[in-house]
Amino acid sequence: MKHIMVIDDSATIRMSVEYALKRPGFLMNHAVNGSDALEKVKNIKNKGEDVALCIVDINMPVMDGITFIDEFRRLDKYTPVLILTTESEEEKIKAGKKAGASAWIVKPFKDQEMINVVQRLMR
Ligand SMILES: [Mg+2]
């Protein structure tokens, strides 16, 4: 079973990502901040299953997206990480890429945009 992590403190955003990406063979996992996501990633890996993609918001309480990416990259060097951002967050996008993010998408996104980026990252 391959897992997709959807990490955002907004339930509305998490649902819209899940709605855009529902595809057979993938299990969507929601997390509300970076710390919640790391715990869930560790549980998945401990079961011997794979995280195939992380989609992560930048601004979240407890642990933000940049810190999450940094921590995630210590566990997993290659799995693609897609940043969810707003147009005003250019500096944070740079920090995210430096931490090891693969790409970013600006909120609000269209379903097809999300699908295209994810297909490119998971090829
Ligand atoms: Mg947020």
Image (spheres, helix red, strand yellow):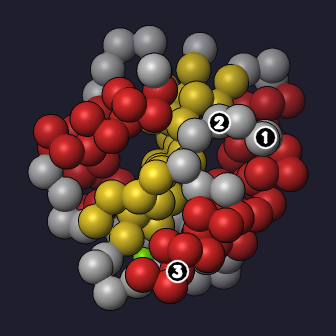
Which residue is disc 2 drawn over? 79
* Quarter of the figure with the N terminus: top right
Query: Is 54 drawn above or below residue 104 in the view shown?
Result: above
Which residue is disc 3 drawn over? 92
* Quarter of the figure with the C terminus: top left
Real-space CA distance between mark 3 and mark 2, rounded to the nearest whole angstrom: 20 Å
Residue located at (54% from left, 49% from top) = 102
Quadrant location, ligand no. 1 = bottom left
Front residue (pair 57, 42): 57
Disc 1 and disc 2 in contact, CB within 8 angstroms: yes
- In which image quadrant can residue 25 be found? top left
- Residue 93, given in percent of the width and then of the height, sits at 49, 73
Residue located at (75% from left, 53% from top) = 72
Question: Is 119 on the left-hand or right-hand side of 103?
Answer: left
Disc 3 and disc 2 in contact, CB within 8 angstroms: no
Q: Secondary structure at mark 1?
A: loop
> Is disc 2 surrounded by few (<14), some (14 to 19) or many (20+) residues within 10 Å?
some
Question: Is 104 on the left-hand or right-hand side of 45?
Answer: left
Which residue is disc 1 drawn over? 76
Amino acid under disc 1: Asp
Real-space CA distance between mark 1 and mark 2, rounded to the nearest whole angstrom: 6 Å
Q: Earlier in the sequence, mark 3 or mark 2?
A: 2
Residue located at (26% from left, 35% from top) = 116
